[in-house]
Image: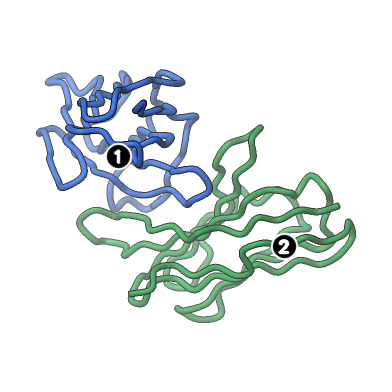
Amino acid sequence: DAKTTQPPSMDCAEGRAANLPCNHSTISGNEYVYWYRQIHSQGPQYIIHGLKNNETNEMASLIITEDRKSSTLILPHATLRDTAVYYCIVRVAGGATNKLIFGTGTLLAVQP
Amino acid sequence: DAGVIQSPRHEVTEMGQEVTLRCKPISGHNSLFWYRQTMMRGLELLIYFNNNVPIDDSGMPEDRFSAKMPNASFSTLKIQPSEPRDSAVYFCASSLDGGRTDTQYFGPGTRLTVL
């Protein structure tokens, strides 16, 4: 699976959009971009994933560049409860090795 | 659905003792994963099962660790004998293999302290 690079930490004001970047310059054509987050003392939680097109669900939006070498997770209106470590992972969906490799992630601190 | 259930939530034991962590995956899920999380090493995959069969145990640190999945609704991770460096939070996760998202659902974790 391709490696990802994320900033170690970011701040965001409550109510504003949080934009979390991820670089995955070695991504392969059949690898998806997944985002999970981990709120303190809890297990990781799935947020969203995509292959090429932008995706949106009730939690967030995922913007993937045309060359697929980077992506941005957008939380449109961040709240204090969104303070967490956010992990960007690239992997083949439904592949024989169905596992997630977690990096160090980005610690997003939402400020009141 | 109750989600992934892990027990115990906290375990404190002494070095050399046997420790057994338990996991009940979400009903209908056919893949199960055991992870370990420490400050130094982050989240690491230890082993995962598909249809109760171990598929990849390359993350199991050493022979002191063993995992079983006797049926689709139960798995154990055993450490024997335990050592202080095994202190960590152990997470179990399950997924529906072949599902559209391959989303993994994590349990609340077991915080293990080995004295």
Q: Residue A89 in the image: state x and y as whole percent.
A: 36, 35
In-front residue for pair A11/A101: A11
Q: Residue at x 56, y 80 (%)?
A: B70
Q: Residue B13 in the image: state x and y as whole percent.
A: 82, 61
Amino acid on which the number 2 mark rests in the picture = Glu
Q: Residue A2 in the image: state x and y as whole percent.
A: 37, 29
Q: Residues within 10 Å of mark 1 (few under 14, many from 20)?
A: many
Q: Which residue is mark 2?
A: B11
Amino acid on which the number 1 mark rests in the picture = Tyr
**In the rendered image of this protein, does residue B108 appear above or below residue A22?**
below
Q: Residue at x 54, y 70 (%)?
A: B23
Q: Colour of chain B?
A: green
Residues at marks 2 and 1, common chain? no
Q: Chain of mark 2?
A: B
Q: Residue A23 in the image: state x and y as whole percent.
A: 32, 20
Q: Which residue is mark 1?
A: A34
**In the rendered image of this protein, does residue A107 appear above or below residue B42?**
above
In-front residue for pair A58/B104: A58
Q: Secondary structure at mark 2?
A: strand
**In the rendered image of this protein, does residue B109 appear above or below residue A11?**
below
Q: Residue at x 41, y 36 (%)?
A: A84
**Could you tell me which quadrant the N terminus of chain A lies in?**
top left
Residue A87: image quadrant is top left
**Could you tell me which quadrant the C terminus of chain A lies in?**
top left
Coloration mode = by chain
Q: Which chain is blue?
A: A
Residue A47: image quadrant is top left
Q: Chain of mark 1?
A: A
In-front residue for pair A31/B104: B104
Measured Cα–Cα span from mark 2 to mark 1: 32 Å
**In the rendered image of this protein, does residue B76 appear above or below residue B56?**
below
Left or right relative to B14: residue B96: left
